Image (cartoon, rainbow, N blue to C red):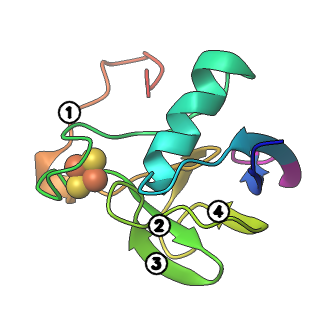
Amino acid sequence: MSAVVLLKIKRGAPGEAQQEVAYEVPFEPGQSVLDALRWIRAHRDPTLAIRYSCTSANTCKECMVVVDGKTVYACTARLESRDMQVGPLPNKKLIRDLVTEIAPPDERLERPPGGKNSS
Ligand code: FES
């Protein structure tokens, strides 16, 4: 039997109570937390909101999340063969699930008049 990781992910949208949802992910040595999150989206739940661009180069800085209480880049944080907790950044505005507003205000697109924010 191959090893699995139980990822307990805090999910929710602004104005909703956050809930912790657990996903079993096959463990492969050398995987990143981002690899596991992408596996969940591909194989278990495509509605899980995550954000990333460079996937492993640690250059876009878009994948920041909290893993076991520490702020990390999901693409460089190593997946470990144990239960792990993953949540959004607590000091940033929550958009949904693991996605928070990290762009500086002067780099954000303006909302169209009367329109909804598409993020
Ligand atoms: S995905 Fe770009 S820094 Fe992690």
Residue 21's spot in the image, x, y percent? Answer: 86, 47
- The residue that disc 2 covers is 92
- Element on which disc 2 rests: loop
- At x 69%, y 47%, the residue is 14
- The residue that disc 3 covers is 71
Is the C-beta separation of discs 2 and 1 under 8 Å?
no
- The residue that disc 4 covers is 87
- At x 83%, y 54%, the residue is 18
Does 110 appear above or below 8?
A: above
> Which is closer to the viewer, label 4 or label 1?
4
Q: From where the camera sits, is residue 19 visible?
A: yes
How far is disc 2 from disc 3 in space, using C-alphas?
A: 12 Å
Per the rendered image, the range of residues in magenta is 12-21
Whether the magenta-drawn stretch holds residue 95 is answered as no
Between disc 2 and disc 1, whose residue precedes?
A: 2
Between disc 4 and disc 1, whose residue precedes?
A: 4
- Element on which disc 4 rests: strand
Q: From where the camera sits, is residue 46 visible?
A: no
Question: Which residue type does callout 1 highlight?
Answer: Leu
> Which is closer to the viewer, label 4 or label 2?
4
Find residue 118 and report its image quarter.
Answer: top left
As drawn, the label of residue 109 is 1
